[in-house]
Amino acid sequence: MTQSVTLAAEALIAGKLVAFPTETVYGLGADATQDRAVAQVFAAKGRPAFNPLIVHVPSLEEAAALGEFGPKASELAKLFWPGPLTLVVPRRQGCPVSLLASAGLPSLAIRVPKHPLAQDLLKAVRRPVVAPSANPSGRISPTTAAHVKAGLGDKVSVILDGGPSAIGLESTIVGFLDGSPSLLRPGGLAREEIERVLGHALISGGDAKKPSAPGQLESHYAPKAVIRLEATAPREGEAYLAFGRVSDSPYNLSPVGDLVEAAANLFRLLHEIDASGVAAIAVAPIPHKGLGEAINDRLRRAAAPRPEESE
Ligand code: TXA
Ligand code: MG
């Protein structure tokens, strides 16, 4: 255990915020059992309080102490944990997680991340840790420690640097609440892989307009620049975010047309284009299969009207 992990665990127990790497994106961590610490997360991110948070633990054993895992949820957990999958299950009685973390819902979103530093931290702290992506609300998710520092540097006690996130997209969220499992958020684990294990299709869940079915705000992951989707070429004044070997743009999600590589590059390239100061981004069409579903979901949110503009 490195000294920085020990310090980070102590900071969490003291109720402070710690940013840490996961294989999906960097998380803004707080002790999930302390209401005040959880509230600090919402405050630091400037996030609307009706958005419930994901609780992180080091293994299924700790997860099962917090929530009720039926046969199908257990099967997915055994196969895909640790990894880029979050399961929403009924909360156990006596579950010590702050109700603020789940926005007062009787359910809990739980994830076991794979990144070794995340694992070390969760084992050291020995408490569940809430961790939304470590970026100001509505901005691009961070996939490096430098992104975290730029967005929230003054709000966190410790930033653990574990290198660039291997997957680069948030976890896939599957809900196990009313009977059939539903896809609440596409993410770093492709829907097809989950459906293959279940032997049937996932119901599509998550409604952005209804905070009670806690999907997400329509506008999310927004860069400062405006975004135009499904663009086969840039117009004057636009930066072009390309996909495949079709363009000489310096910004290419995957020159070889690989969706896993595109996912890993997505947020980093949006950060880079934003940093260049350009006012508009045209994005190439992305195939809607495998991780393309999650990439298109994030791009659609990034392109949606911004709350401050639409109200
Ligand atoms: O990859 C990830 O999942 C990252 C890394 C840091 O682990 N974390 C992340 O957490 O994206 P967060 O807190 O931003 O995700 C919150 C989302 C909510 O917007 C909602 O869609 C879902 O998780 N969620 C949380 N609790 C829920 C619940 N009880 N019922 C339904 N959905 C829930
Ligand atoms: Mg986020």
Image (cartoon, rainbow, N blue to C red):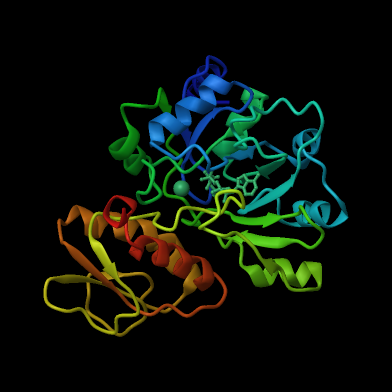
- Which residue is the extreme one toward the front? 311
Residue at coordinates 67% horizontally, 39% vertically from top-left? Answer: 105
Residue at coordinates 64% horizontally, 62% vertically from top-left? Answer: 205
Is residue 228 in view from this perspective?
A: yes
Residue at coordinates 82% horizontally, 59% vertically from top-left? Answer: 179
The tally of labels here is 0
Q: Nearer the viewer, residue 145 or 55?
A: 55
Residue 13 vs residue 279: left or right? right
The N terminus: image quadrant? top right
- Which residue is the extreme one toward the left? 236
Residue 302 vs residue 293: left or right? left
The image position of residue 172, as x and y in percent, is: 60, 57
The image position of residue 243, as x and y in percent, is: 36, 77
- Which residue is the extreme one toward the right? 71
Position of residue 150 relative to residue 214, above or below, is above
Q: Nearer the viewer, residue 50 or 112?
A: 50
Is residue 18 in view from this perspective?
A: no
Q: Nearer the viewer, residue 287 or 255?
A: 287
Residue at coordinates 38% horizontally, 80% vertically from top-left? Answer: 285
The image position of residue 245, as x and y in percent, is: 33, 83
Residue 155 vs residue 122: left or right? left
Quarter of the rendering containing residue 226: bottom left
The image position of residue 55, as x and y in percent, is: 63, 37
